Amino acid sequence: MASKELIRLYVLNVGAGSANVIHFPKDDSAILIDACNADVINDLLFNHLKITSLPLIIITHTDIDHIEGLPKIIETCAIEKTKIGTIHFNNDKIPNDSSKLRETIEQIIKYRETGIINISQRKHAGIDDEHAMNFSIAGARPSTTCKMFYPYPLNVDIAVKKKKPNLASVVLQVIVFDKTILFTGDLPLKGWTEIEKNLENKALQHSSEDLLSDVFIVPHHGGRIQDGTGSRVDQKTATTKILSMVKPCFALVSAGEKYDHPLPAVIEAIVEDNKIKQVICTGMSQSCMNDKENNETILKEIKQFYKEKLNKSSKDRSYEIFSLGSNADVIPCGGTIQVIIEDGEEITLLPSLSQRTEALKKFFSLGEVLCGKIFRRPLASSV
């Protein structure tokens, strides 16, 4: 009996940044959505997955914590003779100084000019025609479709004018088998309100039901959801509104200690949504714990524990993947998260709820962490 087809999503543990890989084992290919920390991404792609092609790279927006690893990834693909298909990104922020961001974008443009890679700017990483809204990933097996919900070219123009790249964050849904994954970049509330309005008016040729997604990558690393107009936003209310639009079963957060992400209000909104089976963050910060007096000490203990673990060889391949990206400056929680989508089966997450329960109990009771309530729910297929 032939084994069923499957794909794996990796939400990489890169600290304060974003990097997501969807792996297609059948043809040793992958797509990359955001590219913070080239070393971690290259380790996964070439040492663990051993891919031979990268048909699509999408950068949700050109903030440094979403794009800084791209030049080195392109270089590594050239060395490994790994074919890159197309790179899509909105050229929505090229600063007029010698910053790292400018250097990064200029290097990418240089690669395009020399013919090393094919870069599409604004054409497909923004809604300007029907093809940009719905497209299949060439070479991906099983067949994989993408739906683009944001931005329009006007949104990109506004982002450039205001020098606020978050305003042009890509919102992309990837559909494989009958399961859906929604990538959201750092889109502020204004963008979500515009998506909602366009869906209601059928302006996107999509309906509100099309936005519904099984797996939801939480915007802005679980950090502050900005209004987009300069007004103050109640974070719990904003998160609840977005969740009501997407109705996910799984909420994943690419977070790091640097900015104390995820915010308590964001996690509270997620935990109170009874449809959500799991919330997993790649890393944790002081904001994650109710014990404000001792949280710094606890975090140091966790950091030391995993540092010692990583210095020891392990035959447990799942732990190797979990540990990707972990170092002395990153406090793991979920670590690198795997989402396994198999034809005809329920979605599986690693680490599982039971694995995380066991790990967290090494340091504190579940009542001491903001997401603790979700561990007390009946364990379904997400275990």
Image: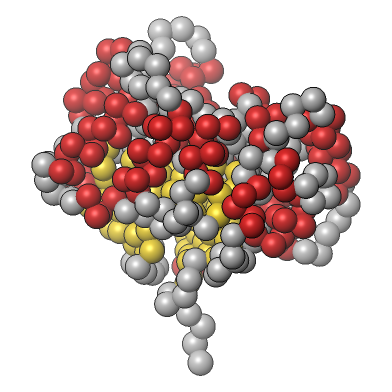
Location of residue 195 (image quadrant)? top left
Viewer-side residue, 11 vs 227? 227
Would residue 117 appear left or right of 15 to someone viewing this image?
left
Q: Is residue 19 visible?
A: no
Pick whichever, 330 or 43, lies toward us. Answer: 330
Q: How many marks?
A: 0
Question: Does residue 304 appear anywhere in the picture?
Answer: yes
Q: Residue at x 49, y 66 (%)?
A: 347
Residue ID at (43%, 25%): 234
Vertical placement of residue 67 versus 83, above or below = above
Q: Tell me the residue at 40%/8% (across/down).
A: 96
Position of residue 10 relative to residue 325, above or below, is: below
- The image quarter in which residue 185 lies: top left
Using residue 102 as the reference point, say whether residue 306 is left or right of it. right
Q: Which color scheme did the rendering employ for the protein?
A: secondary structure
Q: Position of residue 227 (x, y in %)?
A: 35, 22
Q: Is residue 343 above or below residue 361?
A: below
The image shows residue 283 at horizontal and vertical percentages of 66, 39
Q: Is 130 left or right of 295, judged from the image as shown?
A: left
Q: Position of 178 compared to 276: left or right?
A: left
